[in-house]
Image (tube, helix red, strand yellow):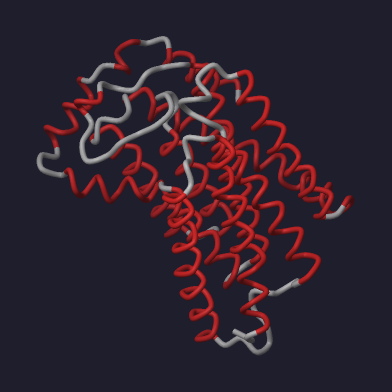
Amino acid sequence: MILCAVFIAWIILTPIFFDFYWNALLRAFFPHAELFFRYITELGGTLLYLGIIFSIYWGIDKKFGKNLFVMYSLSSIINYYAKALIGNERPPQDQWILIGAGHLATPSGHAMSSTVFWGYSAMKIKRTSMWISSIIIIVLVGLSRIYLGVHWLGDVLTGWIFGTLILSLAVIAEPKFESLVNRHGITFFCVTLALLGVFLTIITDFLYPLSHLYNFGDEGGKLIGFSIGIILEEELVKFQAHEEHSSTGKIIMRVLLGLILFSIMYIALYFTLDTSNTWLNALVYVLSLPFGFFIWPLIFKKMKL
């Protein structure tokens, strides 16, 4: 952990890592690859992550799906505050290709979240093929941010290191954390998580000078929406990913139909609500996540899908 902190500090304090030379060099190595990297960068996008999480939660392993969401949310929160603390600006907008970007630059949120998301998945699946696939995705997502011009090389490197640090802490803390949840109950944990989401959103909106430009609604809303969904599911549904009546065909149908419905709801909320407002941004997740974690499981259990 100390070594990670030293590397992060060294990168941040070394100007060469924040020179557009590296972006131009990558573009020279891969000319006319704009569309390729534009699609690759979506492997580190929110909607894809939520789709994978819900696919696992509904149809493969409920506990793994919940834990993966917590890891992803933790990464997002740490990334938000790290960017606020470091305060580096992104490359000039006239260098951006086919994409926009929000908040500050360092560390790269895509590089960091992909390291946590795909790294944690590989740790749990424990297959060589998954580790190889995860490493390739993590590297390509990071390179895509440099190629598309929305991040410096230093942003991506620090994102990878931050992500590795979170994974290392997860290996140490997860058994103790699970013991704590088992002792006090999932409802107590989720209520605490929801209150934390509300508190962090209020305090960040009040104290962070740039919150009007880069609000905390995404991060706070995810904690609140997840907690509401899990509490209701635990109290009223208690589904299992593999019920006795659930054939492979039914599980596939459950996942595909759920993904379509969730995507429609999420996209409709995202484009209907004014996400520049902190609380309306949070509302996107406060409304959509309970659908995925509670309402859809309630429906497909009733339908015996």
224, 193: nearer the viewer: 224
Q: Check the picture and name the quadrant holding the N terminus.
A: top right
Q: Is residue 170 left or right of residue 102?
A: right
> Residue 131, can we see it?
yes
Residue drawn at (64%, 32%), measured in percent from left and top? 201
User: How many tags in the picture?
Assistant: 0
224, 134: nearer the viewer: 224
60, 194: nearer the viewer: 194
Q: Is residue 62 left or right of residue 97?
A: right
Residue 36 pos. (x, y %)? 21, 49
Tell me where residue 193 sits by quadrant: top right
**262 lies above or below 150:** below
Q: Is residue 49 left or right of residue 290?
A: left
Residue drawn at (22%, 27%), measured in percent from left and top? 23
153, 53: nearer the viewer: 53
Residue drawn at (65%, 41%), measured in percent from left and top? 170
Residue 291 pos. (x, y %)? 60, 63
> Residue 167, can we see it?
no
Q: Check the picture and name the quadrant holding the C terminus.
A: bottom right
Residue 78 pos. (x, y %)? 58, 31
**63 lies above or below 115:** below
Residue 34 pos. (x, y %)? 17, 43
**111 lies above or below 2:** below
Tell me where residue 143 sits by quadrant: top left
Q: Is residue 257 left or right of residue 30?
A: right
